[in-house]
Amino acid sequence: MQISGLMVDPVTNMPIVILKDADDKHILPIWVGVFEANAIALQVESIVPPRPMTHDLLHDVLATLGAEVGRVVVSDLRDNTYYATVEVRLGDTTYTIDSRPSDALALALRADAPVFVETSVLEMAESGVDSASEAERLRKWFDSLDSDDFSKYEM
């Protein structure tokens, strides 16, 4: 999956990260906090802050220790909350670390690591929509968005 954009939910005024697959068959909106959205937006917009932010620090610590982020996985959806893991490789060992999706995505961007979403999570997210017509309405809304809509998120 790729981070397709970052926008503000017009109803709740909360930031949303939009993940899309390469074939545009699946869209996964993940509502995130303001600080996490800023961390993602900085990297998406190639803005380098004057001092390292938390996700920059974590990336630099891993690199200094000789570890690398292998991939990020949005791994579960429970009680309307998404869960993610960060896979970190150090030598021949891979560590799987629990993470909030927003932090995992911010780190993946800095590490140029791939992002995956478990098929079961996509199925649960899509089945969580009340009706087929609601799912189609959401898909049409996301499909109608252009790059200007995504740029409406301001740090």
Image: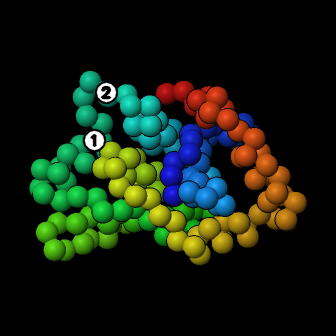
For label 2, the crowd category at 10 Å Cα-Cα, with few meaning under 14, some 14 to 19 and many 20 or more, is few
Question: Label 2's element?
Answer: loop
Disc 2 marks which amino acid? Pro
Residue 13 appears anywhere in the view: no
Q: Earlier in the sequence, mark 2 or mark 1?
A: 2
Q: Position of residue 67 (x, y in %)?
A: 18, 59
Reply above or below: 8 against 113. Answer: above
Q: Residue at 85% of width from left, 65% of height from top?
A: 131
Which residue is at a point 12% across and 50% down the rendered structure image? 64
Above or below: residue 66 compared with residue 31 = below
Q: Secondary structure at mark 1?
A: helix
Q: Is residue 87 above or below residue 103?
A: below
Quarter of the image for residue 147 reads top right
Spot occupied by residue 65 in the image (x, y as percentages of width and height):
11, 56
**Crowd around label 1: few <14 · some 14–19 · many ≥20 (10 Å):** some
The one nearer the camera, 49 or 136, is 136
**Mark 1 lies on residue:** 56
Residue 53 spot, x, y in % from top left: 30, 36
Q: Is residue 36 visible?
A: yes
Q: Quadrant of residue 69?
A: bottom left
Left or right of residue 74, residue 151 in this image: right
The image quarter in which residue 122 lies = bottom right
**Residue under the image location 44 percent in, 31 percent down:** 45
Which residue is depicted at the point 25% across and 48% down?
Answer: 59
The residue where tag 2 is placed is 49
What is the spatial separation of the Cα atoms under label 2 and label 1, in whole angstroms? 10 Å
Image side of residue 27 versus residue 63, left or right? right
What x and y, as percent, mark residue 76? 53, 70
Q: Are marks 2 and 1 in contact (CB under 8 Å)?
A: yes
